[in-house]
Image: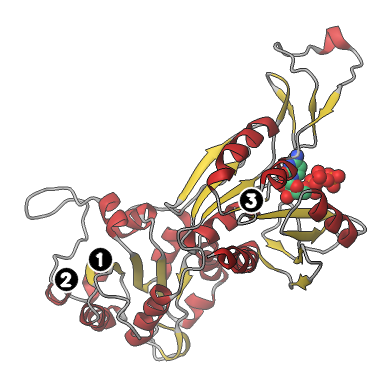
Amino acid sequence: MENVLKNKHIVLGITGSIAAYKAAYLVRALVKKGAEVQVIMTPAGKEFIAPLTLSTLSSKPVISEFFSNRDGSWNSHVDLGLWADAMLIAPATAATIGKMAQGIADNMLITTYLSCKAPVFIAPAMDLDMFAHPSTQQNLDRLRSFGNQIIEPGEGELASHLIGKGRMEEPEIIVAALEAFFSQKQQLEKKKIVITAGPTYEKIDPVRFIGNYSSGKMGFALAEACAAQGAAVTLIAGPVALQTQHPAIHRIDVESADEMYAAAMSSFPEADAAILCAAVADYKPETEATEKIKRETKGEMTLNLVPNRDIAAALGAVKRPDQILAGFALETNNEQSHAESKLKRKNLDFIVLNSMRDAGAGFQHDTNKIDIIDADGSIIRYPLKPKSEVAFDIIDHLAMLVNKYD
Ligand code: CTP
C-alpha cells in the first residue's frame, strides 16, 4: 500500500483507561508511517501514562490544559481542530464518549473535538458491562450519526479479569483503519454539486406561512456524503434546524420557493450535477399581506394560491448533456408510474423513489428505503437503511454518471 499517512496531521486524544499504555505503540506506529502526531490527554489519561513518554515519541509537547504551564500561553483548540487531517481518540473511555456525544466541553480534548472539521475515529476501551450499557451504546450511536467512525473494541480478557467485549483494538488495526480511510479514492473529486434540501415557507403575512414537514435530513446527508467524496457542494437549504459539518459545503439559506429557484438557477451553470431533494411548496399565496391578518376583521377567509415554479423542470430545461440532474419522488400510490412520469417531465437523469407505504421511510425518519429509476427505465431497489448510508448509495450512482463525462 502506498504510504497514505505520510505528512498527515493526526490529533490523538488519550483518555483515562488502562489501555492508554497502548497509545505509546500507536504514536510510534503513526510516526513511523510519516504522520505528524499531536497528543492531547485528558487529566485522567495522565494518570495512566506519562506525558513525557508520548511527547518523546511524537516529538511534540503533549497538550492537556487550556493554558500552557510553561508560559501561560493559550492552547487553541480551534487551531488544532483545523490543523488535523484526522482526529483519533484512543483509548476512549465511557466518560469521554458521553461528553463527546453531549458536547460537554470541560477539557481540551472535548473542545478540540467540537472544533474539529476533520474525520474523527474513536476506539473505545472499557469493561464489558460499561460497553454493553444502553447509555454507552446510545452515545456511540449518536457519535455515528455525527459521521464519526467507531473502531469497535475487541473481545478478550479485560483489566477487571472479566472476559468480554471492551478491549481497545490493537494499535496496528487502528492504524490500518486510518490508512483505509485515507487511501479511499474520492469518487467526486473536483466535481461541483448543487443540492436543494428541506421545505420552503410561503408567506401569508408577516407571522404566518404555508410549509411542510420536510426535515432536510436527506439533503444534508447527501451534502456531507458528496463533500466526503471530494465534491465542492452548494447546499441550498430551506428553513431547517440542521448544521453542516464539512468545510467543502457552501450553504445558501433560503425561505421561499422563489428564493430557492433563484439560487438554484444561478448556481447550476457552474455545476457538474444537481440533486433536487427539497420538498418545494407547490403553491404560494397569490398576495402576501404586509400586516398581520386579524381574525376579528376577517371572519371566514379564503386564501388564493398560485403555483410555484418547478425548480427541477427549470434546471432540466437548461441542462447541458454533460450535466447530471437527479430528483426525488415521495409517493403514496402508483409509485413507479408517478416517479417515471416526473423523471420524463423534468428531464432528470435519475429519480430516487420513496414510498410512504414503507415503514421507516420518508419525512422525519432517520432511515429511508429507496428505488433508483434511471432515464433508460432501469430500476435498482435498495433495502431500508439509515439516511446517511442511503446517501452513499445515491452518491455511488451519481458518481458513476458524472464520471462518464471525464
Ligand atoms: N421539485 C422542484 N421544484 C418544485 C417541485 C418539485 O425542484 N417546485 C423537485 C423536488 O425537489 C423533487 C422532484 O421535483 O426532486 C419531485 O417533487 P414532487 O413534489 O414529488 O413533484 P411535483 O412535480 O410537485 O409533483 P406532485 O406534487 O404532483 O406529486
Crowdedness of circle 2 by 10 Å Cα count: few (<14), some, many (20+)?
many
Q: In this view, does 335 lie to the left or right of 129?
A: right
> At x 78% / y 66%, what residue is drawn?
376
Query: Can residue 171 be seen?
Result: yes
Q: Which residue lies furthest to the top in this view?
A: 297
Q: Earlier in the sequence, mark 2 or mark 3?
A: 2
- The label shown at residue 92 is none
Cβ–Cβ under 8 Å for marks 1 and 3: no
Residue 216: percent from the left, percent from the top? 64, 48
Cβ–Cβ under 8 Å for marks 1 and 2: yes
> At x 52% / y 47%, what residue is drawn?
243
Q: In this view, does 386 lie to the left or right of 88?
A: right
Q: Earlier in the sequence, mark 1 or mark 2?
A: 1
Q: Which of marks 1 and 3 is nearer the N terminus?
A: 1
Quarter containing ligand 1?
Answer: top right
**Disc 1 from disc 2: Cα separation:** 8 Å
Q: Nearer the viewer, mark 2 or mark 3?
A: 3
Q: Residue beneath label 3, please?
A: 320
Q: Residue furthest left?
A: 71
Residue 401: percent from the left, percent from the top? 63, 65
- The label shown at residue 41 is 1
Task: State yes or no: Cβ of the residue under disc 1 lies below 8 Å from any atom of ligand 1.
Answer: no
Residue 126: percent from the left, percent from the top? 41, 78
Q: Look at the image and tell me in which quarter the N terminus lies.
A: bottom left
- The label shown at residue 51 is 2
Which secondary structure lies at badge 2?
A: helix
Compared to residue 382, the image places residue 283 above or below, namely above
Three-letter code, disc 3: Arg
Three-letter code, disc 2: Pro
